[in-house]
Amino acid sequence: MQDFIVIGGGMAGTSAAARLAHLGSVTLLEMEDALGYHSSGRSAALFEENYGHGPTVTLNRASAAYLRENGYLSPRGLMLVGAKDDADGFARDVDELGMATLELDEARAMVPILNPETVGFAAISGAAEDIDTDRMLQDFAKALRTAGGQTVTKAPVTAITRISGGWQVAAGSEIYEARQLVNAAGAWADQVAALAGIAAIGLQPKRRSMARLPAPGGYDVSGWPMLLGVGETWYAKPDAGKLLVSPADTDPMDPHDAYADDMVLAEGLARYEEMVTEPVTRVESNFAGLRSFVADGTLVLGPDPEQPDFIWCAAQGGYGIMTAPAASQLIADLAAGRAPALDAAAVAALSPARLR
């Protein structure tokens, strides 16, 4: 019998497994061919400490040193762009994100395609940074291996049984047993809980779509900040010489291998086009991921109140990559029965007990 089985090989599950491997034996189960196949591999990958609310911001700030010390961050910047008739919405976002306002000439010097006929307001956060998501995921996977843990891919979980002293999990063609079970199954986390006879947390996956465009107007976009529409109605981010544009959609979905909806994508591209001078003439590719939320929009981290050896690591929403260092450390602290590095109020706000 292992000490821990972690279900789900996205960033949340892989980072949790790496931390837990220092406490005992760990098996990480992933249903796809590779780690990070779903939402973790389809992220905008931006670190902004003030993005989110309450406990999410606490996790962001607690993760910052780890991300920086391991070289996962690089400069990007975040520019908020507001229409001329949306002064109130612009002011709200500036205040929430702690941004500095810009003169429109300054904003256009940074991003020459901003449309002076439609853009009325702009603000900047220089603190926003790119995250090297792939290297971070692979480093956690390596840390797990180095500590003696094992990763099993192509292992969809089909049954979970309560046994004396722990759990038995049927995955792929194999049976695994462990004293503690960590549910990091992303959009499928409530389904995993149901297999284990654990009450659901009310998880709702929501689609987020993305289009990859050629660099607009032939510009070198590598030094541009990420652009964000007021109210997060769209965003655009430089990526490998191209531009990723998202409608920032949040359509409820059942768990599945997500794909972009053409109409939703077209509407989002239209909102982006309103703010720029270069029309969208070609979409090179598109994709989508599922961001999963509970009712209060906050991550769910920690032992289930009814079954403490069933540990939740779920509801990351759009914050899973940047919160992973602190979230995984919290999972390990709670599993070990030691005092968490986070303050007690944050731990309680993240606990699944708040949802019962």
Image: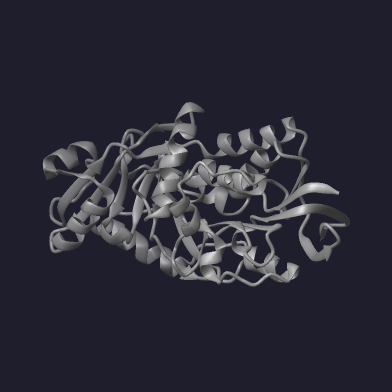
Q: Give the total of numbered labels.
A: 0
Res. 145 image quadrant: top right
Q: Is residue 126 left or right of residue 284?
A: left
Q: Is residue 72 left or right of residue 276?
A: right
User: Which residue shows up at 62% across the image and 64% down it?
Assistant: 305
Answer yes or no: is residue 30 visible: yes
**Residue 246 vertical position relative to residue 130 in the rendered view, above or below:** below
**Residue 2 vertical position relative to residue 350 in the rendered view, above or below:** above
> In the rendered view, how is the structure colored?
one colour
User: Which residue shows up at 17% across the image and 56% down it?
Assistant: 91
Residue 31: image location, x then y, percent:
73, 55
Residue 9: image location, x then y, percent:
67, 49
Res. 271 image quadrant: bottom left
User: Which residue shows up at 68% across the image and 44% down it?
Assistant: 17
Answer yes or no: is residue 299 visible: no
User: Which residue shows up at 65% across the image and 72% down it?
Assistant: 199
- In which quadrant is the C terminus drawn? bottom right
**Viewer-proximal residue, 304 or 109?**
304
**Viewer-proximal residue, 165 or 59?**
165
Residue 33: image location, x then y, percent:
73, 49
Residue 51: image location, x then y, percent:
36, 50
